[in-house]
Image: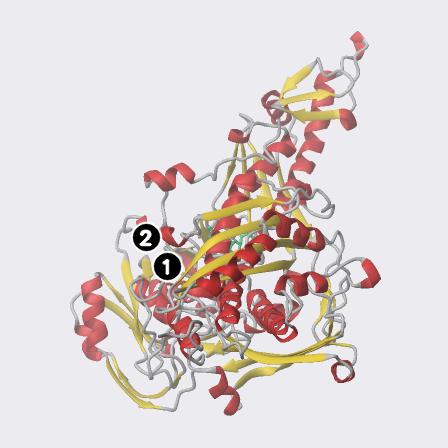
Amino acid sequence: MGAVGKDIPHDSAVTHVTGESVFLDDVAPLSGELLAGIVPSPFAHGRLKRLDISKALQVPGVVSILTHADVPGHNRFGPAVKDEDLLVIEEAVFLGQPLAVIGATSQEALEAARKAVIVEMEELPPIFGIDEAAAANSFIGAPRYIRRGDVDAALASSHRIVEGDVEIGGQEHFYLESNISIVVPGEQGQMTVHSSTQHPSEVQMMVAEVLGVPFNHVVCICKRMGGGFGGKETQAAQPAMMAALIARRTGRPVRFVYSKDDDMRYTGKRHPFKAWYKLGLDAQNRITALDARLYSNGGCSTDLSFAVLERAMLHSDNAYFLPAVRIEGRVCRTNLPSNTAFRGFGGPQGVAMIEAALQDAAVALGVDPLDLRQRNAYSDADARNVTHYGQVIRNNVLPELFSTLRAESDYDARRAEITAFNDASPTHLKGLAVSPVKFGISFTRRTMNQANALVNVYQDGSVLVSTGATEMGQGVYTRIRQVVADELGIPLDQVLTAPTSTDKNNNTSPTAASAGTDLNGAAALDACRKIRERMSVVAAGMLGRPEEGLTAEPARITFDAGLVFDTRAPQRSLSFVDVCCQAYEQRVSLGERGFYATPGVDFNRDTGKGSPFLYYTNGIACSEVLIDRFTGEMSVSRVDLIMDVGKPLNPGIDRGQVVGGFIQGMGWCTTEELVYGPKGQLLSYSPTTYKIPNISDVPPVFNVRFLDNPNSDVSLHRSKAVGEPPLLLGLSAWLAVKDALRYASRGGAVPKLRLPATGEAILLALESLPEPAPAVALG
Ligand code: MTE
Ligand code: MOS
């Protein structure tokens, strides 16, 4: 009776509901604790002329105010390229960039001090948008390319060419817990940093660098996050660094927490993209070539922009075979907080581009969009299973997903119904669309595909496992417990996952790229195997009684259901606890470090070629939308979704990831809009103005199931990563709106639709259409 493959509840399920779960800001104030906060730049782009903190220092309750001059180590930081100033030296590059950090005994004192700081700045011309940045040649780094074959020749000999562009919006992470850190200073420059972070090792390193101390002086701990969604992969570091600066100066514990509004205003988001595409098709409606440009809005610094751009370029094929390809990618430098990782990590933006192109192509060719998609899906026939970067797709389930969903969603009958409905209804429009996903699993930077684990077995047979994986609600702690329990053959409740910390696991990768369980689960498994090997020797010694003619072989010792036995004589078994006690007695180690490095993955950035992914997670969704022709208001009325996650490690939790991911993607595609004022101030900075889906937006018919696919033989227990891929299926809702517009245009030009397709965007698109001639002559 193993735990893997079972619907084990999330290990915080009950305590989240009862309120017992501790998030960082629930920690009671420590003795002498200070609150830290920033003095934000009033301009998105400006030159600092004067910063006078003398009056602010007089405010009762203010203990310390630090500027860049007070930073003992590096003020410049960044995960890949160190190109952002933590505290402004001279030039502020986004609205809200910290000019100084204040440490005070109360929130009131913090606010008063913030007002008492005298700031004089010269406003410089800012850049906010992609078009604006491109016109001003404001880019970060060099362009990137992925190329295959002779695109110009392939386009020249194409039967049809479809050309267009699409504006793809950003997205606020909207984790419920804001970025936060509590820093406790120790002896001799040592620091304990509690952080709500997906990447404890990076917070550790960045805090050490800003303080100018060796990495071993800083321990970063993360018990859990109230959501991360990529927003806490790199950007948890700033609060930690600022709290650490005040802690270092004052010797007191320091808490830095953003209010929800400030977190939305001052931290990075999903990268907005603009994409231009030219898609060539032959007379059989097969794609001949894709020529595309993908420009992202990187914000003020590099952060993860190139990795995000790279994943967008690598996912520009989505599920389709592209014989000839040229993709140019660029990161625009703008005066916004640096944009960052967000569930899908550029994948959704690349997929939005090719899906928009295919939707337009279906209109141009006068064919059903699903027929066109199905025809162009990767298949094993005729070597149409090699991606534009050269990776061969193994165990390709895409054709099966297409045909299964087409049947299960009753697509063809509903297509006919919707056509009839749209012909008849003067008030409403319906749209229907299918979109697939093929999401590459592994970090595209090879080095990051490693993990280590520490497994401690205690004398009572209970087990504590710690890895670099961080828990943000996705269930990685629970899955790792399941893997460890099965590997040691003990009941699940004997295993606990310890809070993630850098003193137990060093040089860890972020919990990202959906690979948290794959990497850390495999490392934990490695540790368990080594412990089992040693315990097997002990057990064989305990079971073998040569004087009675009973033998036992370590190689035959099995661990199952809390028992330890020789497979040849299972009736004579020992309890796991007894073997633990005996091992301790004999001075045999019951603790172990495990390690895992993903085999084989490699990608060459310069040539744009390689096999960056261990495997692909696949899925497909069909969305139907209903639109009010007079207001543009839209609702998603039905969704059918099939997901290939191999053999799910925990079907219940995986299902939660699929449903939640789809809804989050649907929000990105339909209602979540980042609106900025002329000064670069985010106007939609709170739940009242930024519309994420709520319970009433969940499609009333929402059929979700897993494809039964045990074929993935390269991964942990034949499971597949699930965290990000379902988000990309939210695009089917956007495509369904595009489909509805196709009907509204009655054979004329279909108006452009930006992403997100908000009610306003839909209304504007409808209003741009010429008045239809009345169907029935009056009088
Ligand atoms: N699910 C919840 N509940 N909360 C989150 O913050 N983050 C997503 C996804 N699912 C997230 C989530 C993102 S961006 C990633 S990369 C993965 O979880 C990370 O976890 P994993 O690697 O363990 O799947
Ligand atoms: Mo997820 S965007 O890889 O943290």
Chain-order first, disc 2 or disc 1: 2
Tell which of 749 and 299 is nearer to you: 749
Ligand 1 within 8 Å of disc 1? The answer is no
Residue 1 rendering spot, x and y as whole percentages: 62, 26
Give residue 723's position: percent from left, percent from top: 55, 53
Determine the image quadrant of residue 459.
Answer: top right
Residue 760 visible to the viewer: yes
Q: Position of residue 687 (x, y in %)?
A: 31, 62
Label count reads 2
Marks 2 & 1, CB-CB < 8 Å contact: yes
**Residue 204 seen in the current view:** no
User: What's the amino acid at mark 1?
Assistant: Ile
Q: Quadrant of the C terminus?
A: bottom left
Q: Residues within 10 Å of mark 1 (few under 14, many from 20)?
A: many
Query: Image height check: is 724 above or below 775?
Result: above
The disc label shown at residue 736, or none: none
Q: Nearer the viewer, residue 116 or 212?
A: 116
Q: Amino acid at mark 2?
A: Asp
Residue 25's disc is 2
Q: Is residue 765 left or right of residue 567?
A: left
Establish if 380 lies above or below 769.
Answer: above
Horizontal relation, residue 779 to residue 609: left or right: left
Using the numbered discs, state the Cα–Cα distance from disc 2 to disc 1 in whole angstroms. Answer: 8 Å
Q: Left or right? Give the position of 567 relative to 641.
A: right
Query: SS class of the residue under badge 1?
Result: strand
Q: Quadrant of residue 557?
A: top right
Q: Position of residue 709 (x, y in %)?
A: 69, 44
Question: What colour scheme has been applied to the protein in the rendered image?
Answer: secondary structure
Q: Which mark is residue 180?
A: 1
Q: Which residue is pictured at 82% across the width and 59% down the height?
A: 381
Question: Considering the numbered disc 2 on the image, is that residue within a helix, a strand or a loop?
Answer: helix
**Label 2 environment density (alpha carbons within 10 Å; few <14, some 14–19, many ≥20):** some
